């Protein structure tokens, strides 16, 4: 028996108990939340696990996909992200515009200003150095990647520090919140956004073609579901990921009453840890009033963003163990450790300044037809370009133009 | 790093996180039971959310300042929750 065969058998044996433990943890936590908090919270936790499974099985990360496009002009993942934005726009805009009787939810509307520009750029750099975005960090942590635990720890630290400085940043010039629904009406906002997304899609395909590599089609035979086994064990094509994430983020919208978000929870966890260690938050304006103060004074299980994040991690643990990919062996050298620390801090700090990450501000903002989501896209992508070059400087990747 | 080490580290971190959540849960109160979709101020009611702090899990539904700052840093005019 070869070494590879031996390892495969060992993995297949060792991941089964992890899948059982993950399933039991999900079921018991959902039951506990339903009993102790509310059935709505329990449902959102379950939706979180669905998001974790979808993200893991489809490997639906923004970081790697954007890096492949920047380095190799491979835009497959970027086109899947555009599809997600289009589907989310179609689902979200009518709801936040209030056209369905009895169905209402608030948009992710953020102000357009220096804070979003600086924050999204920092976040973009952090994505490449830390090796994950808001959603990507959670599902790769759930996949058992130890390096991402370091990124997540410093993500939390950065988001907490960001909450301390947010008042200073938001005092910088801004032109306020701009809703395209308000500007063009909900039908006009959808049409305008689909037009912009179509133009970006065309641009991506054009760049791919110019790189002398024929673009891989997003919709292939592979995208047709043929067996339940694949749904359970993965891997999923990116199209499945985009559809599943659009559907689950829509459910989040109508059940939670607001778009899916991730990083507020990180600030909250950091603030709770800080106070548990004896730190004083009384001078921090962010935590002195409004929802943040309420969340700080309550159990973490009452915070929707937190329980959905827990769900994403546990969902990814389950998916990874079903796919026999949990906690893969890997190296962690000094450069990777350092970039995980710096990347995590930038991710956390940037997300606070930008009023969210690639989910809360980018997906939530664009699907709510908020201009700050589009600003996030532009400066977040520029940050990714800078971060991709920094990875070369840190010797994590070979020079750009070289295939990884 | 060997897979067994990864599993040990991951298990330890998950265990610590579970203990932390349990301690936090026992030391802090639950949200007061309010009408169905009003349990946490996170969302609910109508056009609420405000990415203005992503925060915001919707302070607007509670008639509270987005971002939890008194000076209304979100650059809004009168009503932070409205599209009008």
Image (cartoon, coloured by chain):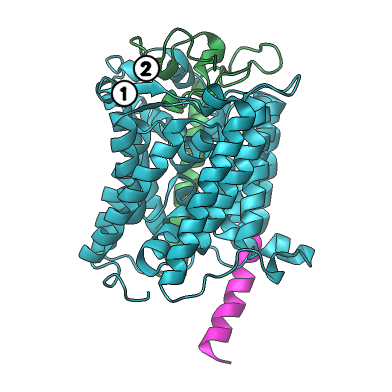
Chain colours: A cyan, B green
Residue sitting farthest toward the bottom: A1
> What number is the disc on residue B75?
2
Q: Are marks 2 and 1 in contact (CB under 8 Å)?
A: yes
Secondary structure at badge 1 equals: strand
Query: Residue A150 magenta-drawn?
Result: no
Residue at 49% x, 34% y is A365
Which quadrant of the view contains residue A371?
top left
Q: Nearer the viewer, residue A190 or B40?
A: A190
On the image, the x and y values in percent for residue A217 come to: 60, 68
Q: Nearer the viewer, residue A231 or B19?
A: A231
- From the image, give the main secondary structure of the stretch colored magenta: helix
Q: Magenta segment range?
A: A1-17
Secondary structure at badge 2 equals: loop
Query: Residue A3 magenta-drawn?
Result: yes
Q: Is residue A71 left or right of residue A326?
A: left
Query: Which quadrant would the N terminus of chain A be assigned to in this image?
Result: bottom right
Label 1 neighbour load within 10 Å: few <14, some 14-19, many 20+: some
Residue at 60% x, 36% y is A190
Label 2 neighbour load within 10 Å: few <14, some 14-19, many 20+: many
> What number is the disc on residue A174?
1
Q: Is residue A199 left or right of residue A282?
A: right
A315 up-or-down from A169: above or below: below
Looking at the rendered structure, the number of numbered marks drawn on it comes to 2
Q: Nearer the viewer, residue A18 or A386?
A: A386
On the image, the x and y values in percent for residue A240 come to: 66, 57
Q: Are marks 2 and 1 on the same chain?
A: no
Chain to which mark 1 belongs? A
């Amino acid at each position: 028996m070869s070494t590879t065969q031996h390892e495969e058998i060992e993995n297949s044996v060792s991941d089964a108990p992890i899948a059982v433990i993950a399933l039991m943890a999900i079921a018991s936590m959902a039951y506990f939340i339903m009993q102790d908090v509310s059935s709505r919270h329990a449902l959102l936790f379950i939706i979180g696990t669905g998001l974790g499974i979808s993200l893991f099985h489809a490997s639906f990360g923004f970081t790697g996909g954007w890096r492949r496009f920047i380095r190799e002009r491979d835009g497959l993942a970027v086109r899947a992200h555009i599809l997600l934005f289009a589907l989310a726009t179609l689902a979200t805009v009518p709801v936040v515009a209030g056209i369905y009787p009895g169905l209402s939810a608030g948009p992710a509307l953020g102000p357009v200003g220096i804070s979003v520009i600086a924050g999204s750029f920092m976040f973009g750099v952090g994505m490449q150095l830390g090796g994950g975005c808001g959603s990507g960090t959670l599902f790769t942590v759930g996949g058992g990647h130890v390096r991402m635990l370091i990124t997540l720890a410093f993500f939390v630290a950065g988001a907490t520090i960001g909450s301390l400085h947010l008042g200073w940043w938001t005092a910088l010039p801004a032109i306020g919140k701009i809703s395209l629904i308000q500007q063009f009406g909900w039908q006009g906002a959808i049409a305008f956004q689909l037009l912009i997304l179509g133009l970006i899609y065309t641009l991506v395909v054009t760049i791919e073609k110019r790189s002398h590599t024929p673009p891989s089609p997003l919709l292939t035979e592979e995208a047709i579901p043929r067996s339940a086994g694949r749904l359970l064990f993965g891997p999923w094509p990116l199209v499945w990921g985009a559809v599943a994430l659009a559907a689950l983020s829509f459910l989040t919208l109508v059940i939670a009453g607001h778009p899916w978000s991730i990083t507020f929870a990180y600030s909250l966890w950091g603030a709770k840890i800080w106070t548990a260690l004896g730190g004083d938050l009384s001078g921090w304006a962010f935590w002195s009033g409004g929802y943040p103060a309420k969340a700080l004074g309550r159990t973490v299980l009452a915070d929707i963003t937190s329980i959905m994040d827990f769900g994403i991690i546990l969902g990814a643990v389950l998916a990874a163990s079903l796919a026999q990919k949990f906690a893969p062996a890997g190296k962690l050298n000094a450069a990777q450790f350092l970039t995980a620390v710096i990347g995590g801090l930038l991710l956390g700090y940037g997300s606070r300044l930008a009023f969210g990450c690639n989910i809360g501000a980018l997906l939530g903002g664009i699907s709510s037809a908020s201009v700050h989501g589009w600003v996030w896209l532009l400066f977040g992508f520029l940050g990714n370009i800078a971060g991709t070059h920094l990875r070369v400087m840190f010797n994590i990747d070979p020079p750009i133009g070289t295939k990884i | 790093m060997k897979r067994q080490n990864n599993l040990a580290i991951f298990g330890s971190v998950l265990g610590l996180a579970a203990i932390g959540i349990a301690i936090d849960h026992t030391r802090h109160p639950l949200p007061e039971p309010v009408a169905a979709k009003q349990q946490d101020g996170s969302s609910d009611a109508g056009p609420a959310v405000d990415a203005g702090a992503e925060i915001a899990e919707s302070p607007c539904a509670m008639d509270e300042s987005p971002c939890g700052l008194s000076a209304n840093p979100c650059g809004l005019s009168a009503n932070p929750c409205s599209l009008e």
